[in-house]
Image (cartoon, rainbow, N blue to C red):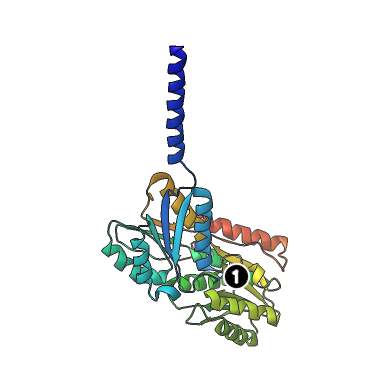
């Protein structure tokens, strides 16, 4: 009898220990906290900010993390938003977009024990991890499609703010056009804004009057206006950052995919699994699956054109073509 009593006590004790262990591993208890300061246009830009948010939603659902975000329309300055995220004791704080660089550096200097992830720009500070993209590589492929399929031999590029990042989109696009069609003319114009849909429409209309039949905007919500105007005018356009076909299903041939969501998810995954991010700098191109193009719709490429496009992609990936030279 005494033996049975001891066994029962042991089993009860083991059960209590197991319950305590399960409580510690409760999947409803977030393991880490992530904060993100979104880019200028904020949520609903159907591009850069939305991609960043999507990456964190995936991390929340699959990695058992929690996250909070700030938009500049609420905080007035990037620095204020970043300060709030630090005050919340987030384990990793993300700054989305090149425009946030200076503010993020100011806050990172003030809080050297906090870790920051800077998307689309670089900082030398030891507590800042940098993620940049080779936008010119996928833009080159978009340019090749436009160069092969243009009927008027005039295509257009619409930039948001004239800066080194957007210049990479433009340079890659022009090089791709010229690679397959040296006689084609490329018209370029910068809007000076990522958030003005009406201005995007106006610029697209000007280009259409100049016989442009393909428009590639790298201009956030301003670019959305250019895409919508392209559809109204019956010409073609390309999306940027995410697959924007759904915006104008009679106009968007393909999109330059900038895998911001994937980059953020992978960084958070590494942090969740190891408690750190192993590298200081990440530069993601076609080879690294950081950029690509969406499926080609609306128009048909011939077998020769498909083979040409695939060969260009392969040559960029293996280094035979260096777009940023």
In percent of width and height, residue 247 lies at 64, 72
Relative to 278, is 110 on the left or the right?
A: left
Q: Residue furthest front?
A: 1
Viewer-nearest residue: 11 or 172: 11
> In the figure, residue 14 lies in which quadrant?
top left
Q: Nearer the viewer, residue 114 or 277?
A: 114
Q: Residues within 10 Å of mark 1 (few under 14, many from 20)?
A: many
Return the x and y of residue 301 as percentages of the image width and height.
71, 65
State the residue position of label 1.
239
The quadrant in which the C terminus is found is bottom left
Q: Is residue 43 left or right of residue 239?
A: left
Asked if residue 162 is positioned above or below residue 83 in the image, the reply reads below
Q: Left or right: where does residue 182 sit relative to residue 24? A: right
The x, y position of residue 49, in whole percent, is: 50, 67
Residue at position x 53%, y 60% in the image: 54
* Residue 101 visible somewhere in the drawing: yes
- Residue 28 in percent (x, y) is at 49, 47
Q: Is residue 98 above or below residue 205?
A: above
Quarter of the image holding residue 305?
bottom right
């Amino acid at each position: 009898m005494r033996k049975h009593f001891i066994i029962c006590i042991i089993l009860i004790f083991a059960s209590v220990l197991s319950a305590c262990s399960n409580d510690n591993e409760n999947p409803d208890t977030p393991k880490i906290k992530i904060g993100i300061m979104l880019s200028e246009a904020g949520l609903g830009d159907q591009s850069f900010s939305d991609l960043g948010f999507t990456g964190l939603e995936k991390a929340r659902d699959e990695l058992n993390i929690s996250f909070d975000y700030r938009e500049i329309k609420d905080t007035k300055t990037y620095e204020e938003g970043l300060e709030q995220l630090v005050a919340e004791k987030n384990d990793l704080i993300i700054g989305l977009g090149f425009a946030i660089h200076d503010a993020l550096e100011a806050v990172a200097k003030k809080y050297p024990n906090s870790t920051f992830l800077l998307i689309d720009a670089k900082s030398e500070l030891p507590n800042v991890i940098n993620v940049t993209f080779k936008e010119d590589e996928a833009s080159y492929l978009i340019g090749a499609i436009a160069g092969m399929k243009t009927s008027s031999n005039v295509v257009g590029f619409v930039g948001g703010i004239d800066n080194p990042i957007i210049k990479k989109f433009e340079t890659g696009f022009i090089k791709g056009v010229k690679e397959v069609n040296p006689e084609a003319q490329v018209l370029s114009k910068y809007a000076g804004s990522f958030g003005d849909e009406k201005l995007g429409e106006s610029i697209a209309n000007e280009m259409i009057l100049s016989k442009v039949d393909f428009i590639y905007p790298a201009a956030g919500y301003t670019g959305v206006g250019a895409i919508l105007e392209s559809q109204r005018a019956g010409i073609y356009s390309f999306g940027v950052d995410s697959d924007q076909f759904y915006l104008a299903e009679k106009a968007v041939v393909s999109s330059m995919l900038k895998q911001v969501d994937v980059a953020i998810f992978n960084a958070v995954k590494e942090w969740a699994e190891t408690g750190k991010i192993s590298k200081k700098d990440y530069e993601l191109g076609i080879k690294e699956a950081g950029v690509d193009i969406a499926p080609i719709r609306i128009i048909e490429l011939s077998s020769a054109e498909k083979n040409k496009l695939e060969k260009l992609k392969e040559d960029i990936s293996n280094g035979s073509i260096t777009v940023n030279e």
